[in-house]
Amino acid sequence: MSSDPKLERIAKGNALALCATGTWTASFAPVLERMVADAEKLAGSPQSIFIDVSEVAKLDTFGAWLIERLRRSLTQGAVEAQIAGLSANYSSLVDEVRRVRASPVTDSGTITITGMLEQIGRTVAGLAGTVAGLVDMLGAVLAAGFRTLIHPRSFRLTSTVHHMEQVCWRAVPIVVLITFLIGCIIAQQGIFHFRRFGADIFVVDMLGVLVLREIGVLLVAIMVAGRSGSAYTAELGSMKMREEIDALRTMGFDPIEVLVLPRMLALVLALPILAFLGAMAALYGGGLVAWLYGGVDPEAFLLRLRDAISIDHFIVGIVKAPVMAAVIGIVACVEGLAVQGSAESLGQHTTASVVKGIFFVIVMDGVFAVFFASIGM
């Protein structure tokens, strides 16, 4: 028997048989494609059609898919084309191919109102799912914290101190450097523009209020979201991929209490400290530029700063820090625990963690701005 593939048509009474012979593998792809395309033209025939594969010498996934594609093309209405003569060696392969569902082809270049509404609906549903996941994680963390208060021995102090070192101590150099430079830039730009009106000294007011109320804590929170939030997601995602979290559950430990709670607590304690250090670095950088570039003496800078700001400005910035830290930690842990078993999934959720963390930090900053304005702070 020749190994070349063939597909012959044989009439059997009121039925039509398509007899496949030879080797149906990817090495004969052009020939097989042409034969199957010709046979698909029989679609709509009133006769019952059988695809006989009993004489097929060799079959791979490509050939099995072509046979299944031919069967689907010839199936019309209540009349379904049948595959006959399938050997035991290839039946499982054809069954696996048959389980593949053909997805409808959409024209991505055509924009319709229905498509736009569908996309909006999917986005809203995805946002609702994200918020629900964050609320669920917040509840789980609060429950784990309550259990820890009842049983203090279960609190993992060593883990918390370790994460404090990673999140706070090791982040001090980059946070101080970035905020120092931002303070320098704000002061330089302020002096450059205020000098036109002879109001150089008012740059101190702008610098003090911006740094203590908004820029200081917001910049630090964004840096923490990109640095520590992504690290949390990558750590938890890697543990999820290696089934370490399932192992913890099997041993009777709560992953939220063991893994999430120490990270959350470390982040909530670290961000106010980093925000304070960042604010001081920004003020120092602004004062240095005001002295060297604007000619404002350090004594005059400090006197003006004392008159321009109050303790309320400092409180507003510090109150924001732990809330933003909690938001960053919850988003990072939710994304980390949502990682599936592939490196691609880990990368996607790590990216999503940073983007969502920064987004929710900015949203919370806006909420706090409205709240403090409403109460006169």
Image (cartoon, grey):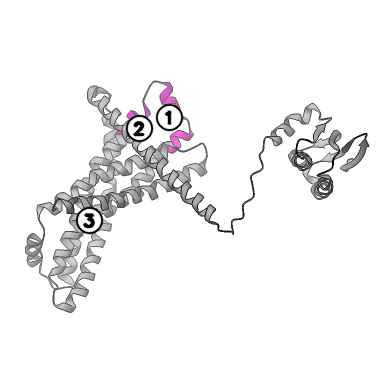
Q: Is residue 164 above or below residue 116?
A: above
Mark 3 or mark 1: whose residue is earlier in sequence: 3
Q: Are marks 2 and 3 in contact (CB under 8 Å)?
A: no
Residue drawn at x 24%, y 54% is 176
Mark 2 or mark 3: whose residue is earlier in sequence: 3
Q: Is residue 67 above or below residue 279?
A: above
* Label 1 Cα neighbours within 10 Å, binned few <14 / some 14-19 / many ≥20: many
Q: Is residue 150 above or below residue 198?
A: above
Report the Cα–Cα distance between label 3 and label 1: 38 Å
Residue 370, image x, y percentages: 22, 53
Residue position for label 3: 214
Q: Amino acid at mark 1?
A: Ile
Callout 3: SS: helix
Residue 375 in sight here:
yes
Residue drawn at x 32%, y 44% is 328
Please state if 124 lies on the left or on the right of 167 as rendered: right
Would you say residue 259 sits in the magenta stretch?
yes
In this picture, which residue range is highlighted in magenta? Answer: 236-261
Please state if 9 lies on the left or on the right of 364 as rendered: right
Callout 1: SS: helix
In front here: 88 or 220? Answer: 88
Mark 2 or mark 1: whose residue is earlier in sequence: 1
Residue 141, image x, y percentages: 31, 32
Residue position for label 1: 245
Q: What is the quadrant of the N terminus in the image?
A: top right
Residue position for label 2: 259
Q: Are marks 3 and 1 in contact (CB under 8 Å)?
A: no
Q: Are marks 2 and 1 in contact (CB under 8 Å)?
A: yes
